[in-house]
Image (cartoon, helix red, strand yellow):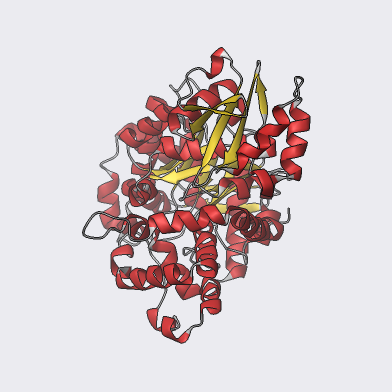
Amino acid sequence: MSKWKDFLKHFDSKEIKVETLKQEAEKGFSEYGVYPRSINEVGNAIVMMARGDEEKCLLVIGEDSRLEDLEGTIIEQDGIKIKVCPLSNENCDVIRAIFPYTNPQSHKGKKITIGLGDRLGLASPGHIETVRDLDVFPVLAQQSIRELNLTGRTYEDVISSAAWAVFQEGYTKGYGADGDHLKTAEEVKMSLDVGMTMITLDCSEHIDNAAADADIADLKEKYQSFPAAEREKWEEKYSNKSFKVGEFNFNISEDDLVRMACVYGGAIHHSVDIYHNLIAKCDRSIDFEMSIDETLTSTSPASHYFVAAELIDADVEITSLAPRFCGEFQKGIDYIGDLEQFTEEFSIHCAIAEHFGYKISVHSGSDKFKVFPVVGEKTHGNYHLKTAGTNWLEAVRVIAKHDPDLYRRMHAFALEHLDEARKYYHIGAKEENIPALNDLKDEQLSELMDMDDSRQVMHITYGLLLQAEDENGKSLFRDEFYDVMYEYEAEYAETLKKHIGRHLTTLGL
């Protein structure tokens, strides 16, 4: 029997007070499984979230017309009628209509914003507890199209998972929803239609990487393909000009302009088109981020300035921009590169962002502890940081600790299918650096999540693991994985508080 049924004894009084119910739920959470911060009055009804035997549910006691559209089953316990509702997307829509704070919102004007990707739909409670008392705006619903495809989820699922977590935790300070690394107008439109509040436009397919190192004579020929009026405007603004941004100075020669235009001109056109045809026409405030980080070469200060100035001149409202920084921001591990060079170049990027009035965005920001102090200092506490896969890895750590057999099977599968996963993500992991499973005791398995090579292997194979099925269509890992995570929900939240908390502390928060 679900433990929450024992909580109904607190409804015996004719005058039920929400605060009293919250106190009782908090005191006896292990006894009842009712989330205290989720207890709310809706007219003459009480709504609250609770842990059932196998999954969470929404409980409704009493009646109110605003709750009539909730789908669920009515049961009676000790003379009390309760509507037990699944945490479906449809029911989430009803709750979001009643409780505005459960809806994602724009983060314009917020200085520090953190994208906290949640590939499982389980991490947001831990994320909320991590940022609850900090001046940090969390983008709880952050997912790329690639991640949706690899996990089999939808943007509706992603927003609902975050909204249910916000309701569960009574978090009223606001959160965002990021359609991450979107490339096409169709993807952007779909994201806006479902309610995403941030659009990260991945311009990689409109950046000519080859032009970065091509012969200048060849580039001058390509440069002629841009409209004459545009070339004249660029040449008047940039060619053989010196620029001072903050304490930094740089020059743009005629050849520099030609090269920058050939590399980034298409990305500028794409961004302007997407912004004015879709984002600016949206009836909501949307945070627009331009991403030029998915390139082979780092973004020079002159290139950053050129791209930003062109967008601003085209009346594009930029909330944040993600350059490609020097060094390597590989998945799931710390920064690889010259920290002194990064500090010098990052400082200039920050000055350019401050000059134009937007935030620098740091992508693949999970576990980049070496650069976090620099990010916190040089941005003067005004930045966007994206994390994602590290939250999945902390879930894997919980699995390794509590279900070593499941972890061993997942690990072996991940190694077997690593080449397939490398098609989606670049990593430097070497299999020969990963200890053989047979050489490890069960209690040592979680330590694999502290080693770079094994972290990266498990990091990029998440989609293959979650969608793997046997010949009968039965999940190989997913169902077991979610069962273990449900049992150890509180531990996972604490693990995230510790791990993401380390990110924030190193950033100086």
Q: Nearer the viewer, residue 373 or 231?
A: 373
Identify which residue is drawn at 73% across, 53% down.
Answer: 509
Identify which residue is drawn at 77% across, 30% down.
Answer: 19
List x then y, in percent, for residue 177: 51, 37
Q: Which quarter shows the N terminus?
A: top right
User: From the viewer's perspective, is 166 left or right of 91?
Assistant: right
Query: To which quarter of the image does residue 273 belong?
Result: top left
User: From the viewer's perspective, is 315 left or right of 352?
Assistant: left
List x then y, in percent, for residue 78: 62, 29
User: From the viewer's perspective, is 340 left or right of 455?
Assistant: right
Which residue is at the far left?
471
List x then y, in percent, for residue 408: 42, 73
Q: Nearer the viewer, residue 488 or 461?
A: 488
Which residue is at the far top?
65
Q: Nearer the viewer, residue 250 or 272?
A: 272
Q: Confirm whether residue 383 shows in the render.
A: no
Identify which residue is drawn at 29% across, 51% down.
Answer: 220
Give the answer, above or below, for where 310 lies relative to 337. above
Total numbered circles: 0
User: From the viewer's perspective, is 307 left or right of 174?
Assistant: left
Identify which residue is drawn at 52% across, 59% down.
Answer: 395
Give the answer, above or below, for where 2 lies relative to 312. below
Q: Confirm whether residue 239 shows in the render.
A: yes
Q: Nearer the viewer, residue 403 or 242?
A: 403
List x then y, in percent, for residue 334: 55, 68
Which residue is at the far front?
78
